[in-house]
């Protein structure tokens, strides 16, 4: 239910954060410079950091208001008698709020650095498209590109949509957001010489880079999904935590091989959360593996635990666990029906959904827009 209903419903917030929120932020920050309001604000005695923080809070409050339509879908589902898992829902909400914070920080920094809002918009979208390119190279090349792609906004939101809360991703997002806002505050101090502002911005960038590097070593994570889709069963996790030796996995699979995706999604991503000493190395001669199928050794997955080695070609979670248990000489835990999540099936007609989403919400936003426009005329 969560992946098939809530994640697609809230994905509209991800699109709005990419294509709408940056322009609102740029208009709020750069508009003051163009209209001359920034010079009046500087005379009020409020520090540049407090002024940018106040604008960021206003933007964030507006973003929470814009998230009300997706939240109304949850209320509708609950009214039909459907089940709602609160921790999973809070994780999804936190992911979209963090994504909005990243957008606000980036757009505010670009709006303060440039002289015209159009230039700021182009630079903001360039950075956004750049993160998509990093994700593309991560899927093709693997290695460091793949690790960097794990910290892009799209990857971050995808993790939250699956009910996975990672401390390193969250901290990196907070550091980047704070860096963008501090950069914006620095460059809106029109009374300071450009050289001094540049030195301050450079210092903030170095401090942020060091903080981001430190955050990558944080391995704590929490699976808030009701189905435990990001984790092994509790019995398997307990057994894996008893293994303290370094586990090395060498997979001869190309980046675009579907088997590599299955191995990463169904097994290794879960294994990393339980065994921090895990080392994974992918080996391939090409990016797609199309012409490597006949090569000897392609498709093999080698496991090395404490000097003992074994090979498997299975990319499922059961196959990986079987290989690890055999090397560790650990008896696999017995499977129980309690570990199987069967969901909360419910088939009901969506009464009132069309009226709410196609009439009520558009009407409310239209009326509120008219009232706000009349008030400021």
Image (cartoon, rainbow, N blue to C red):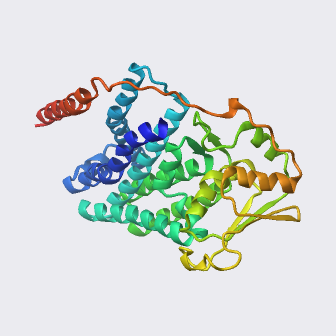
Position of 61 with respect to 374 (left or right) is right
Above/below status of 43 relative to 309: above
Kindly identify the residue that appears in the image at 47 percent across and 35 percent down: 1
Give x and y (percent) for residue 110.
Answer: 35, 60
Q: Quadrant of the C terminus?
A: top left
| Relative depth, front residue between 162 and 300 | 300
Residue 258 x/y as whole percent: 55, 63
Q: How far across and how far down the image is residue 119, in percent?
A: 27, 65
Q: Is residue 65 above or below residue 242?
A: above
Lateral position of residue 314 relative to residue 256, left or right: right
Answer left or right for 303 relative to 40: right
Is residue 197 visible in the rendered image? The answer is no
Q: How many discs appear?
A: 0
For this rendering, which residue is in front, 319 or 303?
319
Vertical relation: 195 (above or below) 88: below
Residue pictured at 25% horizontal, 59% vertical: 117
Q: From where the camera sits, is residue 260 visible?
A: yes
The answer to which image quadrant residue 235 occupies is top right
Q: Nearer the viewer, residue 357 or 369?
A: 357
Give the image location of residue 280, x and y in percent. 70, 64
Relative to 33, residue 241 above or below: above
Identified at 25% across, 27% down, the residue is: 356
């Amino acid at each position: 239910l969560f992946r098939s209903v809530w994640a697609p419903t809230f994905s509209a917030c991800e699109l709005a954060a990419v294509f709408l929120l940056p322009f609102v932020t740029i208009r709020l920050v750069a508009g003051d410079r163009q209209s001359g309001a920034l010079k009046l604000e500087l005379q009020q005695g409020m520090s540049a950091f407090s002024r940018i923080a106040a604008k960021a809070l206003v933007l964030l409050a507006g973003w929470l208001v814009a998230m009300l339509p997706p939240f109304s879908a949850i209320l509708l589902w609950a009214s039909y008698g459907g089940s709602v898992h609160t921790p999973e829902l809070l994780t999804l909400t936190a992911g979209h709020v963090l994504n909005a914070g990243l957008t606000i920080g980036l757009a505010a920094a670009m709006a303060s650095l440039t002289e015209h809002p159009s230039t700021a918009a182009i630079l903001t979208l360039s950075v956004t498209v750049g993160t998509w390119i990093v994700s593309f190279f991560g899927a093709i090349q693997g290695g460091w590109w793949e690790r960097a792609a794990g910290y892009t906004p799209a990857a971050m939101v995808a993790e939250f949509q699956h009910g996975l809360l990672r401390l390193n991703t969250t901290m990196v997002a907070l550091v980047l957001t704070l860096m963008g806002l501090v950069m914006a505050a620095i460059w809106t101090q029109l009374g300071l010489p450009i050289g001094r502002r540049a030195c301050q911005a450079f210092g903030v960038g170095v401090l942020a880079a060091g903080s981001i590097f430190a955050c990558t070593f944080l391995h704590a994570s929490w699976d808030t999904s009701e189905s435990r889709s990001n984790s092994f069963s509790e019995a398997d996790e307990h057994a894996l935590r008893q293994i303290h030796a370094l586990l090395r996995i060498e997979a001869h699979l190309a980046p675009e091989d579907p088997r590599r995706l299955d191995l990463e999604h169904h097994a290794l991503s879960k294994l990393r959360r339980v065994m921090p000493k895990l080392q994974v190395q992918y080996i391939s001669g090409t990016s797609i593996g199309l012409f490597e199928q006949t090569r000897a050794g392609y498709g093999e997955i080698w496991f090395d635990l404490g000097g003992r080695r074994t090979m498997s070609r299975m990319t499922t979670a059961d196959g990986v666990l079987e290989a690890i248990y055999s090397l560790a000489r650990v008896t696999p835990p017995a499977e129980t029906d309690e570990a199987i999540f069967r969901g909360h099936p419910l088939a009901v007609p969506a009464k009132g959904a069309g009226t709410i989403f196609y009439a009520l919400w558009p009407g409310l936003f239209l009326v509120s827009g008219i009232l706000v426009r009349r008030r400021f005329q």
